[in-house]
Image (cartoon, grey):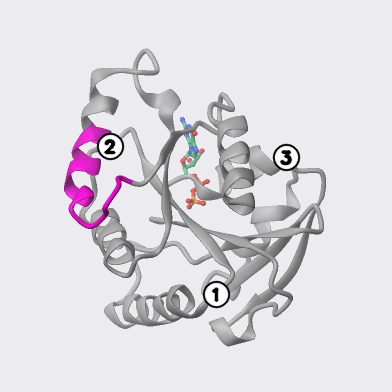
């Protein structure tokens, strides 16, 4: 389940412009500053990977990266930009919702959630929306190294609270993986998880 090769394929403005080769894909989604770029860089170990999507103009696009010539990681715009105007936020919603609802090759959404802070309403809203629309999701908790002792009470409380809040939208609670881009925690688990979902 190792990542041997990653290549940037394209940036798309909407779902119908995305690659049409039917390869399975995972979308990575999260609040701005959740640690998405750090996680991608740490996991892929290739600097050019996430940086592409940080370039001005690419941040509001759907960015496809082909992994090992067989499946895609899709970098979606971060939500909840503190400085974004209301209209920019609305654009993000309709654009991203269109992608989720129309992308048949989407295997699962990896929803990144900062484990070192209490549950954020915007993350809950996002999880609830995905749940209501039956879109497969895995919670990827980030920055787990920031929690005292690695498995501190604060972290467990945050995660439990989060799961309680979203569980009513799912028949079974979505899987969740604890990660840190500082220590590499969760790397193998996440890669294995994605390979299992692809072969399911
Ligand atoms: P993005 O906006 O979601 O792409 O977030 P970044 O990857 O740019 O990270 C936002 C901030 O959180 C930066 O200051 C990172 O150094 C920090 N950060 C990201 N991941 C981790 C992590 O796993 N542990 C710690 N301690 N800090 C992190």
- Residue 164 falls inside the magenta stretch: yes
Secondary structure of the residue carrying tag 3 is loop
x and y percent of residue 51 in the render?
A: 66, 56
Q: Quadrant of residue 56?
A: bottom right
Residue depicted at 59% across the width and 76% down the height: 57
Q: Nearer the viewer, residue 54 or 136?
A: 136
Q: Is mark 2 within 8 Å of ligand 1?
A: no
**Marks 1 and 2, Cα distance to the nearest angstrom?**
33 Å
Position of residue 116 in the picture relative to residue 120 (left or right) = right
Position of residue 35 in the picture relative to residue 2 (left or right) = left
Q: Nearer the viewer, mark 1 or mark 2?
A: 1
- Residue position marked by numbered label 3 in the rendering: 45
- Residue position marked by numbered label 2 in the rendering: 117
- Residue position marked by numbered label 1 in the rendering: 104
Secondary structure of the residue carrying tag 1 is loop
**Marks 1 and 3, Cα distance to the nearest angstrom?**
28 Å
| Region in magenta | 158-173
First reached walking from the N terminus: tag 1 or tag 3: 3
Position of residue 26 in the picture relative to residue 124 (left or right) = right
**Marks 2 and 3, Cα distance to the nearest angstrom?**
26 Å
């Amino acid at each position: 389940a190792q990542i041997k090769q990653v290549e940037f394929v394209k940036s798309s403005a909407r779902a119908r412009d995305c690659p049409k080769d039917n390869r399975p894909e995972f979308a990575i989604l999260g609040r701005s500053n959740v640690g998405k770029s750090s996680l991608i860089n740490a996991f892929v170990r290739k600097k050019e990977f996430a940086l592409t999507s940080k370039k001005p103009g690419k941040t509001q696009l759907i960015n496809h990266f082909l992994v090992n010539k067989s499946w895609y990681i899709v970098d979606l715009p971060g939500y909840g930009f503190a400085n974004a105007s209301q209209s920019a936020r609305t654009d993000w919603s309709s654009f991203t919702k269109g992608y989720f609802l129309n992308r048949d090759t989407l295997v699962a959404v990896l929803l990144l959630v900062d484990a070192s802070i209490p549950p954020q309403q915007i993350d809950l809203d996002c999880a609830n929306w995905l749940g209501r629309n039956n879109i497969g999701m895995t919670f990827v908790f980030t920055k787990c190294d920031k929690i005292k002792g690695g498995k501190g009470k604060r972290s467990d409380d945050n995660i439990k609270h989060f799961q309680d809040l979203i569980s009513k939208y799912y028949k079974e609670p979505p899987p969740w993986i604890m990660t840190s881009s500082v220590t590499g925690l969760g790397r193998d688990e996440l890669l294995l998880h994605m390979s299992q979902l692809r072969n399911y």
